[in-house]
Amino acid sequence: RGIGGPVYPASAYLMKSPPVQMADDKARTELEAFIIDA
């Protein structure tokens, strides 16, 4: 994909202290979209 750096939805959904705070439901939705686009 040519991406680098943190994947913010994954960090927000899986980490206790993510670099960007996000609601769990939004983080999960964005993470699933990221995985599908792989």
Image (spheres, rainbow, N blue to C red):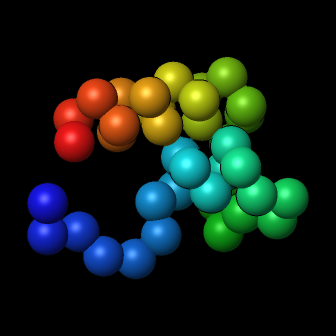
Taking 8 as reference, is 29 above or below it?
A: above
Quarter of the N terminus within the rendering: bottom left
**Position of 10 compared to 21: left or right?**
left
Residue located farthest toward the bottom when viewing the structure as drawn: 5
Q: Residue at x 66, y 68 (%)?
A: 19
Taking 36 as reference, is 9 above or below it?
A: below
Who is closer to the viewer here, 35 or 19?
35
Quarter of the C terminus within the rendering: top left
Who is closer to the viewer here, 38 or 23?
38
**Position of 15 compared to 6: left or right?**
right
> How many numbered circles are shown?
0
Who is closer to the viewer here, 24 or 32?
32
Report x, y in % for residue 17. Answer: 82, 65
**Position of 1 compared to 13: left or right?**
left
* The quadrant where residue 25 appears: top right
Report x, y in % for residue 11. Answer: 62, 57
Report x, y in % for residue 33. Answer: 36, 29
